[in-house]
Image (tube, rainbow, N blue to C red):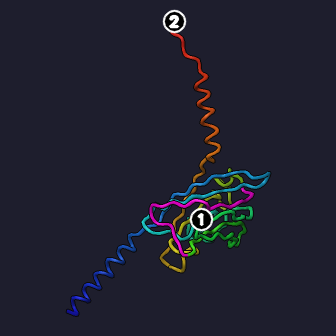
Amino acid sequence: MRRNVLFCVTVGLVISLHAVAQAQIGASVTYTSNQINGTQYQYDFTVTNTGTTNIATFWVGWTAAAYNNYGYIYDLLSGIPNINNSPTGWVGVPEADSPFGGYSVMWYGFGTSLAPGQSLSDFTFTTTDTPAQMASGPSIIGLPRSTSWVYVGSAQSGGTPGDQGSVESAQAVPEPAVACAIIPAIAFGLLRRRPVRLA
């Protein structure tokens, strides 16, 4: 009887460890931009969990030391970020933890996380970095300033050595108001086209 219980516990541990090993973190990241005055731009990021494990940290404008063998962590934003919005249950913190200067923004789930297949918006901040700089750099190391990371644990790795995170290339999308202005203009242009007369 004891041997059977021990066998079942061992099999259960092996299955659990295998499931943890198979779990993968990943995300799709998009953002919109809006110029709010002559030098300030507001960015609203949306994260969709495309992996098989929860996400409890989202970091914008930052890259890890191990990524691409850089050897150091880098904050990619040149302007000090001001956090405007955070999803419910998430806390946003401006960061400046690189020895080379710069800034970034880290959000962590305060007792909550983003489940696989789910999306969260309202990761919003304001900075002097322009949309062109956010999309293509140049940052201090040439990465786009919108480069983002997601982690399983809260507050980066949450103290979990195996939580290596995942780097994501954030994609800019047009503001809904801009899209709404463009579509009627295109439709109006098509309606004004004169029919072709056949000879």
- Compared across the picture, whether 193 is left or right of 6 comes to right
Q: Position of residue 96 (x, y in %)?
A: 70, 71
Q: Which residue lies most toward the right here?
A: 38
Q: Residue extending furthest top?
A: 199
Residues at marks 1 and 2 touching, judged by CB atoms closer than 8 Å? no
Split into 4 quadrants, where in the image is the N terminus? bottom left
Q: Nearer the viewer, residue 22 or 106?
A: 106
Magenta residues, as a range? 111-129
Viewer-closest of 129 and 189: 189
Q: Which residue sits at x=62%, y=71%? A: 91
The residue lying at 24 percent from left, 86 percent from top is: 7
- Asked where in the image residue 58 lies, by quadrant, the reply is bottom right
Q: Is residue 124 located in the magenta-colored stretch of the structure?
A: yes
Judged from this view, the residue extending furthest toward the left is 1
| Mark 1 crowd level (few <14, some 14–19, many ≥20, 10 Å Cα) | some
Q: Which mark is residue 199?
A: 2
The outermost residue toward the front is 88
Residue 58 visible in the picture: yes
Looking at the picture, which amino acid does disc 1 mark?
A: Pro
Residue 142, visible in the rendered structure: no
Query: Is residue 95 found left or right of 7 in the rendered image?
Result: right
Residue 152 is one of the magenta-drawn residues: no
Please give the residue where the numbered disc 1 appears in the rendered image.
87
The residue shown at (36%, 78%) is 17
Residue type at tag 2: Ala
Query: In this view of the protein, which residue sits in the foreground, 62 or 94?
Result: 94
Q: Is residue 122 above or below residue 20?
A: above
Q: Is residue 22 above or below residue 193?
A: below
Of mark 1 and mark 2, the one earlier in the sequence is: 1
The image quarter in which residue 143 lies: bottom right
Disc 1 is placed on an element classified as loop
